Each structure stands twice: as C-alpha cells, then as structure tokens.
Amino acid sequence: MKMEDSIWSLLEEVIDPELGVNIVDLGLVYDVLVDANRQVRITMTLTIPECPLADEIVDQVKNAASQVPGVEGVDVNLVWEPKWTPAKMNDAAREEFRARQTMTP
C-alpha cells in the first residue's frame, strides 16, 4: 500500500468532534502529498473558519499521519478556499449525519 493511501486510511479515524463524522467522509481533507524525503503535507479545511476545536483536530491529523511507518514529518495546511459545504460530504457521511439527527430528541 502506498504511503498516501495509508495516511488517507488513518485520517478516516479522525472524527470531527462537533459532527461526529470522520474528516475524510466529511470532505475536509483536500490533498495528501508525500515528498521524496517522506515529509507529508496535508491540505484540509474545517467546517467553519472559527472552529473552536481547530487545534485539536489538526493535532489529531498530525498524530494519525505520523503513525504511518517511514513518515518523517507532517505539516497540515489549513485553507479556507475552496470553502467547505455539506455538498463535499460523501454518501457515508450523509447517512451517518442523518442517523445522528434522528437520534437527537
């Protein structure tokens, strides 16, 4: 398995604490690049720029990517363009989000 694929897989374990859905299915991760020195650059966004849990999410992303054998360093590039919208969620995220909404009293 390619290093990028392993990183994407581990990023699926990072859950947005407010929505309860992983950041990959939400469409928050735009790109994962690994250079020749095994430095990882993850370009991503958050659901809102003023997210109070931004530091926590970024730390979880760095920790997840660092678990892949051979990774020498991880840089998370938070971007605000293109802006995140619910349209970026995949079908799995939509189903999970809907299920959570129906459970809420």
Image: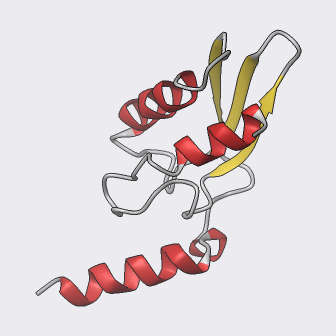
Residue lying furthest front in this view? Answer: 1
85 versus 48 height, above or below: below
73 versus 76 height, above or below: above
Would residue 35 be found to the left or right of residue 56 on screen?
right
| Camera-nearest residue between 94 and 3 | 3
Residue 2 placement (x, y as % from top left): 78, 37
Would residue 46 be found to the left or right of residue 55 on screen?
right
User: Which quarter of the rendering shows the C terminus?
Assistant: bottom left
x 32%, y 85%: residue: 99
Q: How many marks?
A: 0
| Camera-nearest residue between 72 and 86 | 72
User: Which quarter of the rendering shows the N terminus?
Assistant: top right
Residue lying furthest left in this view? Answer: 105
x 35%, y 63%: residue: 19
Would residue 28 be found to the left or right of residue 59 on screen?
right
x 33%, y 41%: residue: 52
Residue 83 placement (x, y as % from top left): 67, 57
| Camera-nearest residue between 81 and 33 | 33
Residue 79 in view here = no
Residue 3 placement (x, y as % from top left): 74, 32
Would residue 39 be found to the left or right of residue 71 on screen?
right
x 59%, y 47%: residue: 9
81 versus 95 height, above or below: above
Q: Residue 103's image quarter?
A: bottom left
Residue 9 in view here = yes
Residue lying furthest right in this view? Answer: 36
Residue 12 placement (x, y as % from top left): 52, 51
